[in-house]
Amino acid sequence: MGGQKSVLLAESICDWWSLAGVDALVGETPAGWLVAPPANDPAPKPRPVIAAEAEPPPLPAALQRRAADEDVPAAKGPVAFPDDWDGFQSWLADHPDVPGSQWDARRVLPVGARGAPLMLLTAWPEIDDQRDGELFSGAAGKLLDAMLQAIGTTRADCYLASLAVTRPPGGRCDARDAGELERLLSHHLKLAGPGKLLLIGSDIVRMAANLALPDARGRLLDVNHSGGRVAAAAIAHPAMLLTRPAHKAAAWDSLKLFNRGR
């Protein structure tokens, strides 16, 4: 190989090595040919220091988890009911431990005398009753008066009461409250000592007689309580009868069991 082409090839190779930074075959200082040269970019800016987030405020004491050894308030035992009539009526009016008094500030209290020939009992006041502070008020009360007249009596001759003295939200209570109300029912009947009992509304029929209202139609029921038994009949609440007049026939089938004229 030789000639002009060889000279040009040699010059081309020398030019390539010169462009690569090689200006001598041998140097005194070792060179790292594979090390990338330093970049010409400016030095990176320091990263800002982010302040630590502030500690969130502690939860209220009521929401904090209790330690295993922390004292927990003891649950209250069953409420003690007064054994005398006057004391019981006063207790219903203002004592904070009355079952069924926790749902409203205004209590709807019983009306009438102990030992009445007929006791009218419902589970709790209706919305209108709670507002007016009187059981069986408004249009429902007028219907009830007509029903009582049909069996030869009046409201004034009866003892009217609701098992709970206030109305629970939505007209429903939980199992614990229902248990306390059932205890109160037995005690209330014992002290009231009525001749007969008219259960008004499906809730009180279920609690007092353990029956669905349709199953109590036209039947004379025996309701047990701590003082013995009382003959009872059951009807739908007059407020419901106003919206469902077809149920009036079933109510009459039960009411006529107490009809003095039969």
Image (cartoon, grey):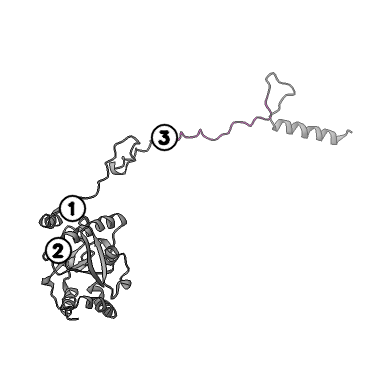
**Residue at (25% x, 55% y) in the render:** 180
- Pick the front one: 95 or 71: 95
Q: Which mark is residue 81?
A: 1
Q: Is residue 149 left or right of residue 61?
A: left
Q: Is residue 169 above or below residue 256?
A: above
The nearer-to-camera label among 1 and 3 is 1
- Pick the front one: 107 or 75: 75
Which one is earlier in the sequence, the residue at label 2 or at label 1?
1
Return the x and y of residue 261 as percentages of the image width and height.
Answer: 17, 81
Q: Is residue 203 above or below residue 243?
A: above
Q: Which mark is residue 121?
A: none
Give the residue pinned by disc 2. 110
- Pick the front one: 206 or 106: 206
Return the x and y of residue 234 as percentages of the image width and height.
Answer: 25, 71
The nearer-to-camera label among 2 and 1 is 1
Q: Main secondary structure of the magenta part?
A: loop
Give the residue pinned by disc 3. 49
Dot 1 falls on a residue whose secondary structure is loop
Which amino acid type corresponds to the residue marked 2 in the rendered image? Pro
Which one is earlier in the sequence, the residue at label 3 or at label 2?
3
The nearer-to-camera label among 3 and 2 is 2
Residue 4's image quarter? Answer: top right
| C-alpha span from label 1 to label 3 | 69 Å
Q: Where the C terminus falls, by quadrant? A: bottom left
Which amino acid type corresponds to the residue marked 3 in the rendered image? Val
